[in-house]
Amino acid sequence: MKSGKTTAKQVSREVPSLPDYTVYTLSTVQKSLCILFSGVLFAMIGYLFYHQWILSLLCAAGAVVTPRYFRQFLLQRRRSALSIQFKQALYSLSSSLSAGRSVENGFREAVEDLRLLSPDGDHDLIFEFNIITACLEIGQPVEAALQDLARRAQMEDITNFADVFAACKRTGGDLVEVVRRASSVIGEKLEIQQEIGVMIAQKRFESRVMFAAPFLFVLFMTMTAGDYMMPLYSGTGMILSTFCLLVLGGCLVWINHIMKIEV
């Protein structure tokens, strides 16, 4: 009995866990570099506003929270890339089915087309479609693999496609039309997102310049008129500097919030 349990544990360790696209885990190197660079940046800002190393180190301690935001940034970038890759895969799958190929061969052709777009093979959807083709080779239904991908991705486009695909397989619907329509709708949605991104790109750049302007101005005044800035480094001046830093931090949060537009 004991040996049976050990064998089951060994098998579970040998089977790699499939990726969950709703979370992103930073590696130790990524987390360390994020804390290091943000800590240096915060220390420089602290010294610029206070001219005291102790307060600068206290500002640098705020770097411990930056990996959370860096992780969110990488997660969003990964999910955006997965959405674009899924659109490309649907275009390829639609072309294959329209040419008369079977669903199984259509997914295999989609993998080859995705490899042409990403020669290095570092592609989340290539990995997922390889799983789907492997499931097909051992006789598992493709809709089950798609539903599993939708469950792990938690993306509206993939979930809707998996549901419609499964319904068509059960009822004998027109898969060619379903895939073509799904690829068209997802493509239009991504085009709208890209248009919005282009429209706000200039405003995002302007907001970053405006956010950096106070720091550059303080640096310029410190280098050119150090005596004039001395009152800011003691007494009431430090309170004023702290208030300004808090206001700038609030502005950064507000800018990121209004620039986040979902379609």
Image (cartoon, rainbow, N blue to C red):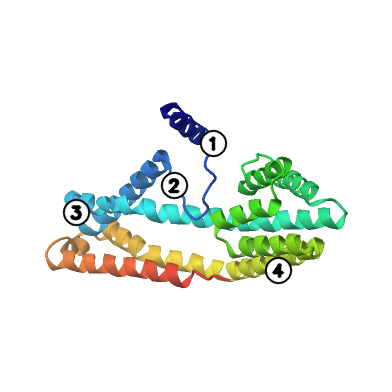
Inspect the image, locate mark 4, and give the three-letter code of the amino acid beneath it: Val
| Disc number placed over residue 185 in the picture, else none | 4
- Which comes before the other along the chain, label 3 or label 4? 3
Residue 185 seen from this side: yes
**Residue of label 2:** 25
View extreme (front): residue: 1
Give residue 154's position: percent from left, percent from top: 55, 60
SS class, disc 1: loop
What type is the residue that disc 2 sits on?
Thr
Judged left or right of residue 125, residue 8 is left
Q: How far apart are marks 3 and 1 (CA)?
A: 50 Å
Instruction: Kindly identify which numbered label has been placed on residue 55.
Output: 3
Label 3 SS: helix
Task: Examine the rendered structure and indicate whether residue 78 appears above or below residue 119.
Answer: below
Give the class, few, some or many, for how many residues have Cα within 10 Å of label 2's Cα (few <14, many ≥20). few
| Relative side of 157 to 27, left or right | right
Secondary structure under badge 2? loop
- Count residues near mark 3 (Cα–Cα under 10 Å), then give few for <14, some for 14-19, many for 20+: some
Q: Residues within 10 Å of mark 1 (few under 14, many from 20)?
A: few
| Dot label at residue 101 | none
Q: What residue type is labelled 3?
A: Leu
Rounded to the nearest angstrom, the CA distance separating label 2 from label 3 is 31 Å
Q: Residue lying at the far top in this picture: please name it.
A: 3
- Label drawn at residue 15: 1
For mark 4, give the secondary structure. Answer: helix
Q: Which residue is most to the left?
A: 235
Q: Which of marks 3 and 4 is in front?
A: 4
Residue at 49%, 69% in the rendered image: 260
**Which comes sooner in the sequence, label 3 or label 1?**
1
